[in-house]
Image (spheres, rainbow, N blue to C red):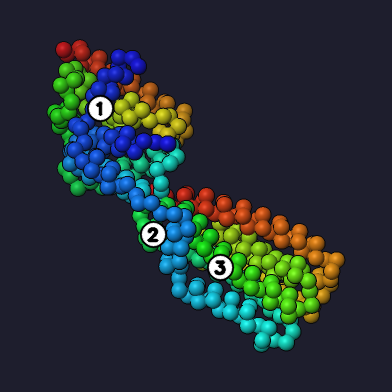
Amino acid sequence: MNNLDHRIKEYFKAPESKRKEEFINSLAPSEISFARFVISQAGYIRKLTWILFSLVIVGIAAVPFILDSSVIWFVSGLMPLLALLMVSESNRSIRYKMAEIESATRFSLRSVLLARMVLMGTVNLVAIVIAIPVSTHFGDYSAVASGLYIVTPFLVAASAGLYIVRVMKGNTALYSVAAVSLFISLFMFLSRDRFTSIFIKDAVKYWGLIALLALVAMVKQTAMLIKNTEEITWNW
Amino acid sequence: MLDLQEQYDKIYRYCYFKLYNQELAEDITQETFLKYLEHYEFTSSETTLKYLYTIARNLCIDEYRKQKPVSTEDIAEMPHEDNIIDNLSIKAAISKLSEEDRELLLLRYANDVGIGAMAAIYNISRFAVRRKILAARKRLEEELRKEDAYE
């Protein structure tokens, strides 16, 4: 450092801070496990979302007792609605910056969003775990085929929805996600009678391929959405 | 990973030389870190610096608007660690620089903020940052020549 650099540095010496230690000590966070943190986010997800989740899951479990056939088509038609709930709730957290108001101040929006998606993903997994044996037992397809017919619409709806909320803003995003989910649901409801060829045994491998691609897309979109939350928050 | 204590000192220094008031500088420094920690954990380097200085600057601007403007003479007369500096010409020269030049010199030479981080803070290219720093330094040298000529 030359003489002028040194003189500049010397000039910019401020009086010693009187309250630094006290402030920094007050920031020391208490320990919290990730599991506890995830569970703590349950209270910040809207009650309506939880009610709708519950209704869908109950619907899945109850459908064999209501319909004498078409169980799997009804169940797989419900799965995109679960994806819609998950995506719309995640979008709400970002759009209205609810996380920064609702959460403890020491957690980033990114952490909160990830925790909420883990929580809702777990609920969706419960729904899938219920749906597959129910559909297999009351249907005409193998467990693998039933699983694919249930999981694939969910994954396609979720990956498309996450992409939409990442690239679109505002209500347009939400309406678009709803439209995509409802389209997929409707397709599954009607497909039994209209598109029977896609449910033959030989087509199962294509369902598997679509499910795999949709899974990869969903994971990628989730990662990009969470990464983008940092930029969304700070608009100076 | 940035050291919290070190960055506290730097942000405090930044705020002090914006407002020339120790109590206010402490308040705004703490508010800066609280606002930052509301959304982020203390992790990445350039991004953290960008956000910290941006928050601090905005808070200082808000506070500055509430106060009466600090004149060039006031800045030259402000008390700071001149038991170490007994070179009055540097004080007088820096006080004659623009707010922007003082900020550039403080960030670069006193707070050791890197060119990349400064580019992120100002949202300009690294080349533009280097150019501005060189220009500020040149203006300081000219003022110093004038001050030394009077001594």
- Expressed as whole percent of the image width and height from the top left, the position of residue A59 reads 61, 80
- Expressed as whole percent of the image width and height from the top left, the position of residue A220 reads 62, 52
Let me know if marks 2 and 3 both belong to one chain.
Answer: yes
Label 1 vs 3, first from the N-terminus: 1
How dense is the environment of label 2, judged by Cα within 10 Å: few (below 14), some, or many (20 and up)? some
Q: Is residue B60 visible?
A: no
Let me know if marks 1 and 3 both belong to one chain.
Answer: yes
In three-dimensional space, the C-alpha distance between marks 1 and 3, rounded to whole angstroms, equals: 56 Å
Q: Which residue is mark 1?
A: A12
In three-dimensional space, the C-alpha distance between marks 1 and 2, rounded to whole angstroms, equals: 38 Å
**Front disc: 1 or 3:** 3
How dense is the environment of label 1, judged by Cα within 10 Å: few (below 14), some, or many (20 and up)? many
Q: Which residue is mark 2?
A: A103
Name the element at disc 2: loop
Disc 2 + disc 3, Cβ < 8 Å: no
Look at the image and tell me in which quarter the N terminus of chain A lies. top left
Q: Which mark is residue A123?
A: 3
